[in-house]
Amino acid sequence: GRQTAATSATPRQRHCSQHPNTTSLLPSRWRGAAAVAAAAVGVALASSSSSVEPGPWETGLSAAEVLSSPAWPAAFPLTATHLARLDETPDTRFYARPRINVQHVDESAIAALQELYAQELPRGGAVLDLMSSWTSHLAEGRGRDRADGHFARVSGLGAHAEELRANPALHDYHAHDINADPRLPMYADESFDAVVCSVSVDYLADPLPVFREIHRVLKPGGPALFTWSNRMFPTKAIAAWRGGGGRG
């Protein structure tokens, strides 16, 4: 079956979006969304052997140990070599065909995502579903259908308009190639109570600008939830992810 893992952050300081790797600017318990998201790849690979260029996240610790007592690197740990993809053609070409009703995680992973989101996402809040598709992995009565009224707004941003249009959870959506342009001008500062990115962070070819935008659109104290699985589209996943052994 497919395994999932997750991490979250509650950003508390607006200025740290300009300095996402300067840990002295970040609160002691939670780090800014940019810093935590930058660490997500390192958490997933923490106890994995890697065939790509080694990075400072390779501590030999399990993912759980990394998350329980994070040691934040002084600089963003991923180089151009780590971020390289086998297929560097525009993502719009790869995602030209909609994959409606194709589940990218198995039933147990979906249940884990639904439980996580039910616990962590604020009822009545505005949620950004980043790198979304035809499903937002929300539980029945907890936002799966916008008509259930669980959230005031769920906005989806993803690669394919047809998939987004088919997602019953979304109140609005934007088809946008985030690897071609990480800016999110369609969203105002501090306009969301939470941001989720389900099993997709491994496809970000230039993650830091995206993390800065996530931090910008989040309200202070809002959670940013990143989840990943042990499967992928290998030609579009970054090298650091492909080189992991799948443990942790």
Image (cartoon, helix red, strand yellow):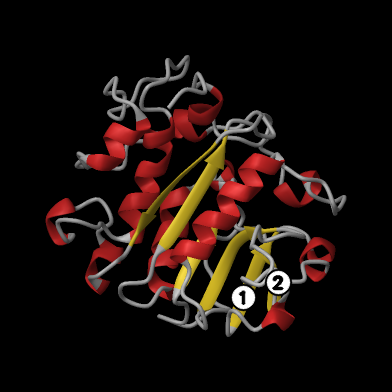
Q: CA distance from mark 2 to mark 1?
A: 7 Å
Q: Which residue was labeled with disc 2? A: 169
Callout 2 crowding tier (Cα within 10 Å): few <14, some 14–19, many ≥20: many
Q: Quadrant of residue 236?
A: top right
- What label does residue 39 carry, if any? none
Q: Which residue was labeled with disc 1? A: 154
User: Is disc 2 placed on a helix, strand or loop?
Assistant: loop
* 234 relative to 143, above or below: above
> Sequence order check: which comes first, mark 2 or mark 1?
1
Q: Residue at x 73, y 82 (%)?
A: 147
* 141 relative to 137, above or below: below
Q: Is residue 198 visible?
A: no
Q: Residue at x 40, y 43 (%)?
A: 40
Give, as a three-letter code, the residue at label 2. Ala
Callout 1 crowding tier (Cα within 10 Å): few <14, some 14–19, many ≥20: many
Q: Is residue 195 visible?
A: yes
Give, as a three-letter code, the residue at label 1. Val
Question: Residue 60, how many percent across, how many down?
Answer: 29, 19
Query: Do tag 2 and tag 1 residues touch (Cβ < 8 Å)?
Result: yes
Q: Quadrant of residue 232?
A: top right
